[in-house]
Image (cartoon, rainbow, N blue to C red):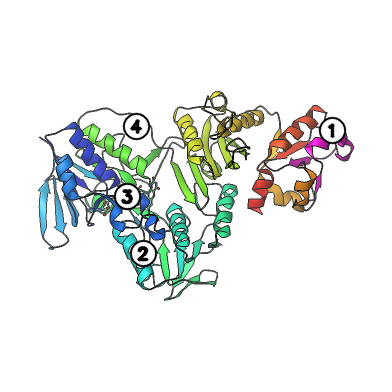
Amino acid sequence: SKRILVVGGVAGGASVAARARRIDEAAEVIMFDRGPHVSFSNCSLPFHLSGIVQNSDDLVMMSPEKFKKQYNIEARVNSEVTKIKREEKKIVVKNLITGEEYEEPYDKLVLSPGASAILPKSIEEITRPNVFTVRNVVDIKKLHDYIVVYNIEDVAVVGGGFIGVEAAENLRLAGKNVSLIEAFDQIMAPFDYDMAQILQKEMIDKGVNLIIGDGLKKINEDSLELQSGKKVAAKVVVMAIGVSPETRLAREAGLEIGVTGGIKVDHNYLTNDKDIYAVGDAIEVYNRLTHKPSRLALAGPAQRQARAAADNMYNIPHNNKGVIGSSVVHVFDLGAASTGLNEKTAKAAGISYDFVYIIPGDKVGLMPDSCPMHFKLIYEYPTGRILGAQAIGKGNVDKRIDVIATMITMGGTLEDLKELELCYAPLFSTAKDVVNHAALVGLNLLYGRFKQVPVTKVRELVENDEFIVDVREKDEYAEGHLKNAINIPLSEIRQRLDEIPKDEPVYLHCRSSQRSYNAVMALQNLGYNNIINISGSYLGICCYE
Ligand code: FAD
């Protein structure tokens, strides 16, 4: 029978062990983790800070005893694998409690050591005791208890990725004064700049002191110093500027490392050693849209890779199509989901693309909790192949993005998405769902039926004194409008054509682009040929300004 050893006992490690057991009752399976736990919910860690998960012990889903009883898998905690002796097919393990070192032979070895939080040495005083990271149950308990014991009010989170955003939200929900510091020009890299503005506005509205475009320079006892010289009050600092794949073991064993810094694996998650697999945050994956190697630190892919690796040990075939990257995050009252490519990544990959930005209702407007959903769809130009999407709103953004992820995986186009038959009742969606609607707009653009400019160009349009028509009703206009936009409601436009010039570009917007799109089509059909819709419209403008 096979002897399978697994380094790391969480998302990837526990999955590979359990899958191997389901395939082979006779295999000897041993999992090693240097921490005191295996199989905990990394993704639920931030929720201990707000008390949504009150007891940190609840974050641990399986004890070593339970692993033994239910799966006949041995889980050795506080056990660090310090070396791989490939020629002898052995690993060296250090018991972190006793200090004892010993060797274990393997037939198959699986590496799922994950990724560690980046703590740049260039930041002064980064090793202070008030600096924390969030990776495991011990980390979150330490952070949580420090805040409680020292009655901390001012906390800074450095890094606006999903871990930073979740940490900031949960700390804010716990009533803390939270600053979020992001060195780039936006938070949440999976989103384009225009969409990220909505999330940033939500954070600011909920009382987070959001600082964008400024890096951390120095940490003091009760404050931070930023690159700009600005000071931020903070007695606790949570570092969440990104993660780095744990490749030391692999590197020292002479396993190949890819160009992105992750462990290089083949189609079956085998390293360049035919008896050593690697999965999860530590590896380099293949992006099926850009056709380039990349890294993706998410739980779903880690579990899929783990299953595939175990299957491969038993010659069970699987079809590795690469990754597209789908994720969702909670930002106070909003959900924010994305999949595939955004404008930035499509551009960087040299892919010809265009996009749709719409803000339809997520449910029938009469329903009590109907809300606008910001939805951006990226497609390949001119093929119409769907490349990615981003959705932000109070409603079910994950459903919409999961539909798009499915479309991308199946190689779908705008035509396919237009025809996609989805379930509908007023409390759930609209008869023409957000995603169908995006496909219709996309096809209209693709076939040249109308022109648009993105909401990010509005400032420029205003500064250049372009001719902008706001087609909302008068009362909506009165409540707030763009500085030099004139108001001609859609309901009056056919009677007021003499106010609209024919010899210069005319930009239209309404609240969500729907009425302005109707106005664009009406004017075009009346012989105007330089009418341009502002995609994103007033709802987008409000977030952007
Ligand atoms: P891990 O789950 O990190 O497990 C690696 C384990 O290996 C660790 O316990 C480590 O101690 C151990 N280890 C490393 N080296 C050794 C060694 N030499 N010897 C012994 N043990 C070793 N993903 C999502 O998809 N959605 C989310 O909402 C989400 N939220 C997250 C929130 C937080 C706070 C964090 C930290 C991550 C989140 N993730 C989320 C990412 C997800 O948790 C990871 O992608 C996933 O856990 C990766 O699995 P892994 O097995 O590669 O690594």
Residue type (three-letter) at the residue carrying disc 4: Asn
The mark closer to the camera, 4 or 3, is 3
Q: Is mark 4 on a helix, strand or loop?
A: loop
Percent coordinates x, y for residue 386 in the rendering: 53, 32
Is residue 46 visible in the rendered image? The answer is no
For marks 1 and 3 on the same chain, the one whose residue lies earlier in the sequence: 3
The amino acid beneath tag 2 is: His
The percent coordinates of residue 388 (x first, y second) are 51, 37
| Circle 4 residue | 320
Say whether marks 2 and 4 touch (CB < 8 Å): no
Q: Which residue sits at x=39%, y=60%?
A: 49
Q: Mark 2 points at which residue?
A: 144
Quarter of the image with the N terminus in it: top left
The residue at the point 46 percent across, 48 percent down is 329
Segment tinted magenta in the rendering: 484-510
Q: Label 3: which residue?
A: 41
Give me the residue at 57% from left, 26% from top.
418
* Residue 284, horizontal then vertical, whole percent: 35, 44
Q: Give the spatial CA distance, label 1 vs label 3.
A: 59 Å
Disc 3 residue: CB within 8 Å of ligand 1: no
Q: Nearer the viewer, residue 477 or 187?
A: 477
Q: What residue type is labelled 3?
A: Ser
Q: How far apart are marks 2 and 4 (CA)?
A: 40 Å
In the image, is 185 to the left or to the right of 523? left
* Label 1 to label 2: alpha-carbon separation: 62 Å
Tally the marks: 4
Name which residue type carries label 1: Arg
Residue closer to the observer: 346 or 116:
116
Q: In which quarter of the image is residue 127?
A: bottom left
Q: Nearer the viewer, residue 11 or 53?
A: 53
Q: How crowded is mark 4: few (under 14 residues within 10 Å), some or many (20 or more)?
A: some
